Image (spheres, helix red, strand yellow):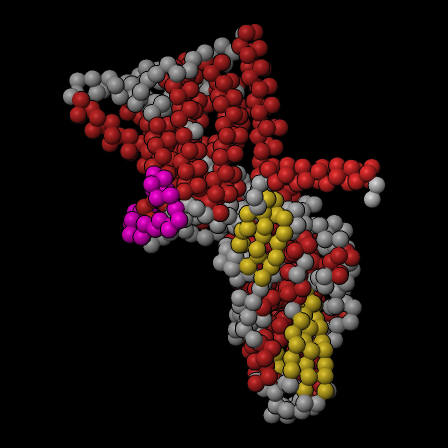
Amino acid sequence: MSVVLADLAYWQETTIRLVVGLIAVLLPAGTLVYLFLFKMMSFMQSRLGPMEAGPYGSLQLLAEVGKFLQKEDIVPQAADRLIFKLAPFVVLISTFLLILVIPAGPDLWFIDVDTGIFLGLAVSSISVIGILMAGWASSSKYSLLGALRATGQLIAYELPMVLAVVGVIIQAGTLNVQEIVMAQATGEIFGFGGIGNPYVITQFVGFLIFLIAVQAELTQPPFDMPVAESELVTGYLTEYSGLRFLMFFIGEFATAAIFSALAATLFLGGWYVPGLEATDNLFNVIGPIILLGKMLLVAFFIFWFRFTYPRFREDQLQQLAWKVLIPLSLVNIVITGVLKVVF
Amino acid sequence: MSDTADTKQMAYIAAQAADARVNLEIETEGMTLNIGPQHPATHGTLRIVVRLDGEQVISAEPLMGYMHRGYEKLTEVRTYPQVTTLVNRIDWLGSFANEVPFILAAEQLMEVEAPPRAQWIRTALFEMSRIANVVLFLGDMGVQLGAVTPVFFAFRDREFILNQIEAVTGGRFHPNFDRIGGLKDDLPKGWIDETRGVLKRIRNFCDEIETLVVGNEIFQSRTRNIGVIPADIGLSYGLSGANIRSSGVDWDIRRDGGVGLVHNELDWKVWTHPDGDSFARFWVRLQEVRESCTMIEQILDGIPSGPVMAKVPRIIKVPAGEAYVETENPLGVMGYYVISKGDLTPFRVKIRSASFNNVSITPWLLKGVYVPDVISILASLYFILGDIDR
C-alpha cells in the first residue's frame, strides 16, 4: 500500500488506511460468522440456519448487529466502571494491530518492518490484558474464574505458537513477513520450483502445532474452558451486553480470521499462487482474494473442530501445551535447524 | 503435672499455634459459588452451593424446592382419573412412564387387570417414553462437555419418537393416555409399520452417538474415572436406574418383579458397567436405548388382539386400602404409595421419584473435584428438575 499511497497527502493516506483497515478486519470476520458460524454449523447439525433475512439469510449479520446496537449497555453496580468499559476496546486493539503485519500483495501492506512476525506475535498477546480486565472489572465470580482460566491458557499456548513459527523463520531466514511469502513463492522443493515451496510441506508439524495453538488462543472448543457456557455461563463475557458484547464478538471472529490469514501467509504461501511471477503486478489486485480464499481454507479446519469436539478440562489443556506441544515444537526446531545446515 | 510433661505440652501447643499461623498465612480464602438456581447447566432450577478453593470443590450442597408444585397434596383433591394429568409433569421428558405406576397402583387397589393388549401397548409406550427421554440425555451430555452438535441430532431423532407417541395418544409431552383398567384408545392404523422405521432411525442415532461422542478421546478423558460411585455407596444413597447399574449392580425392576407390564415376556438384557464413573453412566444409557428398541420391536411383532379396556365402573371409587407400585422409569425407580379411604380421591399419595435420590449423592460425590467436573458429573447423573421437586 505504501507504493500506492506515495503521492497522496497525509490526511488522504490516513483516511484510506483507516477505511482499508476496517474493511480488512470486519469483512473476513463477517465472512467467517456467516459462512461458518451460521451456515456450516447449521448444516453440520442438520438444520438450515438463518434463511429469512435476505437470500439464504445473508443479511442476518446486519440484523444481528442491529439487535446488539439496540440493547441496553448494562454495567453491573459493583463493577469497576472505567476498566469494565475499556476492556472490549483493548481486546479489539490487539486484533487491529495484528492485521498490520499481514501482506496482501507484493505492494499491499500496512507496515513492512524487518521484525514483522515478531511484532505480530507480540501484539496478539495484548488481548490477554483486555480479557483479564473484563474478568476482574465485572465483579462476578464466573467472570473472574473465566478470565483467570483464559489468562493461563493464552500464556501457555503462546509458547507453542511462537515456537512453531520459529521453524518457518529458520527456513525462510527472515522475520519479515513479506519476505517469508517471497521465499515461499521463489523457493524450490528438491530443485523443482513449479509450485514454489509452501512451508506446509516441510513444516507440517509446525503447521499442525500452529493450528492447535491458534484454536487455543481463540478460546474455541476444544479449548473453550474460559468461556465454557455450561459451567461459567460465558466466563469473562458474562456481564457484557449490547455494543460491548458485540465488540468482544467481533474481536473473537476477526482474530480467528486474522490468525487464519497469518497461518495461510506463513505456511500456505500467502497471497501467492503458482503460475505467475511473484513480482507480477496482477497480485496487487488478486492477492487479497487469494489470501481470503486460503484464509477460509484454514478457518474451515478451525471451525470444523470447534463444532465437533467437547472441551478439555483446564489441567488437561495445560498438560497438552506443556507436555506435548512445546517439546514437539522444540524437536521440530532442532530438526529444521539441522536440515537447514545440511541442505 | 511434672515439669517435663509441662514443657512437652507447651512445646506441642506452641508448635500447633505456629502451624495454625502458617496455615492462616498460606491458605487462601475460599470462595462460595452459587451454581443456580438460574444457570445454563442445571436444566431448570437446581441450586448447588459449592465452596471452592481455587477451582477445587471443598463442599457442595444441592438445594432444591425452587420448582415444587405440590403434586402429592394436589392429588388429594383430584379424582383418580384426573391424577394422571398431574403426574405427567413430574418427569416431563418421559411423561407417559410417570402415569404407569400410579395407574398400576390404582388397579391393584380396585383389583382389576388391564387386558393383555392394553398391557402390551402400555409397555411399548413406556419404552418409547424412555427412548424420548434418554435420547435427549445422550445429546445433552455433549453440550455439558462443550460439544454442541450431538444435541441437535438428539432433538432431530427424538422428534420421530414423539410423533409416534402423539399418533397414539394425541399428546407429545403430556399424553394422559393411561386409564385404570386399560388405555383410552387402540393403536391407529399403520402405526406398527411406521414405528419400525422410527426404531431404525433411533438405532442409527445410537451408532452416530457412539462414533461422535463415545469414541472421542476428549470425551473419554473428561468422563473416565470422573465421579466414581462405588456400588455400596450408591446403594446406601438410594441410587437407582442406570446410575446404579453403571456401578455394577445388576438390578432392574423391569426384570426383577415388574407388575402390570410385559417385560418378562420379552427377550432383552440388563446392561451394567463395572466402573461407576461418568463414562459408564453414559454408556449404560446408550445401551439401554438400544435395548428399548429391541423390546419395542418384539412388542410390535407379538402384540395380542383383543380389547384395550377392562370393565370398570363409569365413576371410579377405589376401595379402601394401601398399595405401593414401583416401575423402572427412564430416570430410575419411580414408585407411588397410594392410600385410599374408599373415596373418589386418594387419601394420600407419596411419590418416590428417582432424581430426588440420585441428586442426594452430590455432596459426597462432588467433594474434591474441579469445577468443570461438577458439570459433567451432574450431567451424567441425569436428573430432571420436575422429578426432583415434584
Number of marks in picture:
0
Residue at (54% x, 40% y) in the render: A222
Compared to A5, does A148 lie above or below?
below
Whether B98 is among the magenta residues is no
How far from the left and from the top, in percent, is residue A302?
48, 36
Could you say where residue B47 lies in the image, as x and y percent from the top left? 55, 59
Q: Quadrant of residue B21?
A: top right
Q: Is residue A137 above or below residue B384?
A: above
Q: Quadrant of residue B124?
A: bottom right
Residue A114: give x, y in percent of width and height.
Answer: 37, 14
Q: Nearer the viewer, residue B236 or A338?
A: B236
Q: Is residue B113 above or below residue A89?
A: below
The answer to whether residue A341 shows anywhere in this view is yes
For residue A68: magenta?
A: yes
Q: Main secondary structure of the magenta part?
A: helix
Segment tinted magenta in the rendering:
A60-86
Q: Judge whether A317 appears above or below B87 on screen.
A: above
Along the line of sight, the residue nearer the viewer: B168 or B365: B365
The quarter of the image holding the C terminus of chain A is top right
The residue at the point 62 percent across, 82 percent down is B179
Of B314 and B35, nearer the camera is: B35
Residue A215 visible in rendering: no
Q: Residue extending furthest top? A: A342
Q: Residue at x 42, y 20 (%)?
A: A118
* Nearest the eye: A334 or B303: A334
Residue at 68% x, 40% y: name it. B17
